[in-house]
Amino acid sequence: AQSVSQHNHHVILSEAASLELGCNYSYGGTVNLFWYVQYPGQHLQLLLKYFSGDPLVKGIKGFEAEFIKSKFSFNLRKPSVQWSDTAEYFCAVNARNNDMRFGAGTRLTVKP
Amino acid sequence: DTEVTQTPKHLVMGMTNKKSLKCEQHMGHRAMYWYKQKAKKPPELMFVYSYEKLSINESVPSRFSPECPNSSLLNLHLHALQPEDSALYLCASSQDLQGHSPLHFGNGTRLTVT
């Protein structure tokens, strides 16, 4: 089965700083890739997804991610974070039908 | 607000109790999921239903018994649970069966086993 690694467990940034969260997966075949966000006390929500086409995908709230097949990576970026971006971020991979696996998550704290 | 509704929001049960968690969606999604999430951990896949048939069971103990009565409803029947089963139980649904569609999550049921 596929697996997902997120390198950063807890990231602390000041407002307006740039963000990059790492995500690597292990699976030899075709994958569908996702980033989800969980704001405090809220349900998991989709930030963005990739399954084909342009490897640079844009999501909600100014987030984007780049799929690099040769590196098995799907890193999440945002040029300038806001206090409201404080949340838990999960990378997820779906390598076979409906088998969505999540990484361990990265907790982002943005200081005002 | 989420379009996947889970009830109850909180549940406390003893180890000898039988209870059920319920999940409902009216988006016409044909895949429904149960995940378990412990504090500060990612969601762990438990079960997947596709077109009301169980398609994935991640070696979940038999004290958890899923049921999909129709395309909108998903239940998780609980019996003889252990304290370590205390967690947030998340229901999700997705539109397609090829893995392209994202999951839509409910708010979860926070289960405490005493």
Image: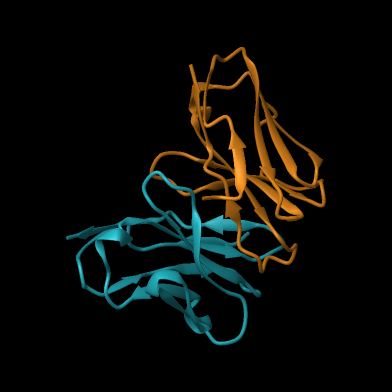
Chain colours: A cyan, B orange
* Above-or-below relation of A31 to B71: below
Q: Name the residue located 38 percent from the left edge and 75 percent from the top edge.
A: A62
Which quadrant holds residue A88? bottom left
Q: Name the residue located 25 percent from the left edge and 61 percent from the top edge.
A: A83
Q: Name the residue located 44 percent from the left edge and 76 percent from the top edge.
A: A65
Locate residue B55, reporting x and y percent. Answer: 77, 50
Locate residue A8, reporting x and y percent. Answer: 32, 61
Q: Is residue B56 visible?
A: yes
Locate residue B10, reporting x and y percent. Answer: 50, 28
Residue B76 lies left or right of residue A87; in this view the side is: right
Q: Name the residue located 49 percent from the left edge and 52 percent from the top edge.
A: A44
* Above-or-below relation of B38 to B92: above
If the image is split into quadrants, where does the N terminus of chain A sit?
Answer: bottom right
Locate residue B87, reporting x and y percent. Answer: 49, 33
Residue B80 lies left or right of residue B112; in this view the side is: right
Q: Is residue B59 visible?
A: no
If the image is split into quadrants, where does the C terminus of chain A sit?
Answer: bottom left
Count of all numbered marks drawn on residues in the image:
0
